[in-house]
Image: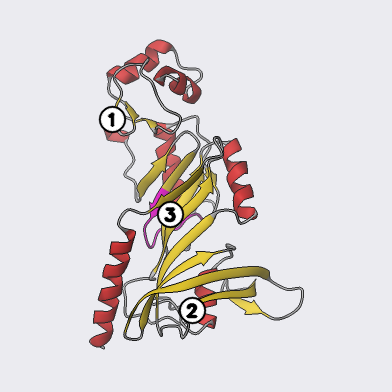
């Protein structure tokens, strides 16, 4: 496939001369490098972007981990809403992605596939067309997407590994809890292993087998080891924010069917730094 083929997929009504001018103005990027010719070869997995004029380029509140013609995977920072109600004045990841794609890939149809809590950080995937959206939503619905989180908890769990299962119910105030009432709630399953301990604190590697609202936060609280910084679910609050981050995301590419795993660069080092800082802060209390 040539670059011209890819650009015609993104801009089906654009004339060849227009596309050529975009390349000449170094606005077309292939794998982060400015393209030189329309006839250059482009692989299916190559990220092809068309950047806008510098004065109108969006200032993104996140880092792009991966992008191709079907997917956009970002590293959402702590404190940024994934999405919310229409006319929401606060910035959201969804609004920023839409603005970004409006400039770089106008034919894309931004799809919100899943969410992260505002105070959690980490990997989020958005679809860029209807086919990708349908495929990804099915994968999340059938729980075939692999998701791994790092969490710092206190007190440390008594077991080095455990699987937590319950049925979760959302209250009127938006908080979530487990219920034992037959026929109520959504089934939720969480697995964790202890990666490192420091005093009364532990760094957990948490794997989601389902993806319910506040699932990890509720399950760890009810297991007796709430997440540090989680004021809503019993966590110690002497740290700046929720110590929970989505660090790995595995899924089947909606076009090729190839399994892809995304990881946050240096996630382990950043989490360990935060873990050490939490331990140091606890000694000063």
Disc 3 to disc 1, C-alpha distance: 24 Å
Tell me which corner region of the image, top left, top right, bottom left or bottom right, holds residue 155.
Answer: bottom left
**Location of mark 1 (residue):** 33
**Location of mark 3 (residue):** 123
Q: In the picture, which quadrant includes the N terminus?
A: top left
Q: Position of residue 159 (x, y in %)?
A: 48, 82
Question: As rendered, which of 105 and 166 lies closer to the eye?
Answer: 166
Magenta includes 133?
Answer: no
**Residue closest to the far front:** 160
Local packing at callout 1 (Cα closer than 10 Å; few below 14, some 14-19, many 20+) is few
**Location of mark 2 (residue):** 233
Residue at image position (69%, 71%) is 185
What label sits on residue 84 in the rendered view? Answer: none
**Which residues are the magenta region?**
74-84
Residue at image position (61%, 43%) is 135
> Main SS of the magenta segment?
loop
Q: Earlier in the sequence, mark 3 or mark 1?
A: 1
Question: As rendered, which of 251 and 63 lies closer to the eye?
Answer: 251
């Amino acid at each position: 496939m040539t670059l011209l083929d890819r650009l015609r997929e993104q801009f089906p009504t654009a004339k060849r001369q227009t596309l050529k001018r975009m390349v000449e103005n170094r606005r077309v990027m292939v794998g982060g490098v400015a393209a030189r010719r329309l006839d250059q070869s482009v692989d299916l997995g190559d990220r092809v972007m068309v950047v806008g004029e510098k004065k109108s380029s969006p200032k993104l509140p996140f880092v792009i981990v991966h992008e191709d013609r079907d997917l956009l995977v970002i590293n959402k920072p702590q404190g940024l809403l994934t999405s919310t109600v229409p006319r929401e004045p606060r910035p959201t990841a969804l609004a920023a992605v839409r603005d970004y794609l409006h400039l770089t890939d106008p034919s894309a149809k931004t799809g919100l596939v899943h969410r992260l809590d505002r105070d959690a950080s980490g990997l989020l995937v958005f679809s860029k067309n209807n086919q990708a959206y349908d495929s990804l939503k099915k994968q999340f619905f059938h729980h075939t997407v692999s998701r791994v989180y790092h969490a710092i908890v206190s007190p440390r769990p008594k077991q080095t590994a455990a699987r937590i299962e319950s049925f979760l119910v959302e209250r009127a105030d938006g908080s979530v809890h487990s219920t034992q009432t037959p026929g109520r709630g959504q089934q939720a399953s969480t697995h964790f292993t202890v990666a490192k301990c420091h005093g009364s604190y532990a760094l957990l590697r948490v794997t989601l087998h389902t993806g319910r609202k506040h699932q990890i936060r509720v399950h760890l609280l009810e297991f007796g080891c709430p997440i540090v910084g989680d004021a809503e679910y019993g966590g110690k609050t002497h740290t700046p924010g929720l110590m929970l981050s989505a660090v790995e995301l595995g899924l089947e590419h909606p076009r090729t069917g190839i399994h892809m795993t995304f990881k946050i660069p240096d996630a382990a080092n950043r989490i360990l730094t935060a873990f050490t800082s939490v331990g140091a802060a606890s000694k000063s209390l």
